[in-house]
Image (spheres, grey):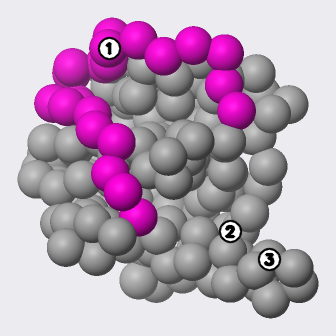
């Protein structure tokens, strides 16, 4: 959804832009059968990230994650197919946007390995491109601060899962 239509834009209209806003957010790690991850190019931060964004009222965490995956990545996911793999928050998880807004993000990170459909339709108001990246190429990919945090969380969870197998 374009920023101007979003809940956060409505909140900013009321509280202004000189206020650190605490925002619940979602990020989605989408993995295909070739062990590639879907990344989106976020022009606000001039780098790649996993699909994600601010929660909209009236939707569950999983519904927000599925909405972001569709808007930013063109991936249609049933919310119940999303698995919560971690949470990211803290003083180092603060987003500073080009318009001057600053938000502290509290994100639930979901993993998706099964979806219904993929299209090339993405929300071009904030995303310039999408691409599938092999896991071996991610360390050399310029990620946003959120992309780096999500990748670290996925690696931590992946290590824990692999050690149990």
Q: Which dot marks residue 161?
A: 3
Q: Residue at x 76, y 80 (%)?
A: 162
Residue under label 2: 87
Quadrant where the image shows the C terminus:
bottom right
Can you name the residue that lies furthest to the bottom here? 163
Which comes before the other along the chain, label 1 or label 3? 1
Q: Residue at x 70, y 33 (%)?
A: 114
Q: Residue at x 44, y 50 (%)?
A: 36
Quadrant position of residue 127 = top left
Q: Are marks 2 and 1 in contact (CB under 8 Å)?
A: no
Q: Return the residue found at the far front.
A: 34
Check residue 116 for magenta coloring. yes
Q: Is residue 105 left or right of residue 111?
A: left
Q: Nearer the viewer, mark 2 or mark 1?
A: 1
Q: Which residue is mark 1?
A: 120
Q: Which residues are magenta?
A: 114-135
| Label 2: element kind | strand
Residue 78 picture quarter = top right
**Residue 39 x, y percent position in the rendering:** 34, 46
Q: Nearer the viewer, residue 34 or 82?
A: 34
- Tag 1 near tag 3, CB within 8 Å: no
- Looking at marks 3 and 2 on the same chain, the residue that comes earlier in the sequence is marked by 2
């Amino acid at each position: 959804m374009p920023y101007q239509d979003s809940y956060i834009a409505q909140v900013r209209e009321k509280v202004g832009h000189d206020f650190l806003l605490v925002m619940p957010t979602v990020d989605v790690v989408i993995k295909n059968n070739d062990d590639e991850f879907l990344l989106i190019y976020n022009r606000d931060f001039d780098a790649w990230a996993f699909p994600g964004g601010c929660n909209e009222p009236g939707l569950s965490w999983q519904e927000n994650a599925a909405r972001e995956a569709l808007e930013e990545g063109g991936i249609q996911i049933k919310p119940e197919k999303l698995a919560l793999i971690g949470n990211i928050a803290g003083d180092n998880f603060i987003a500073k946007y080009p318009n001057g807004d600053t938000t502290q993000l509290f994100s639930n990170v979901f993993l998706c390995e099964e979806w219904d459909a993929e299209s090339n339709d993405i929300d071009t108001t904030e995303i310039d491109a999408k691409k599938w990246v092999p896991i071996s190429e991610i360390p050399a990919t310029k990620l946003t601060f959120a992309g780096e945090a999500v990748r670290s969380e996925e690696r931590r969870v992946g290590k824990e899962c692999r050690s149990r197998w």
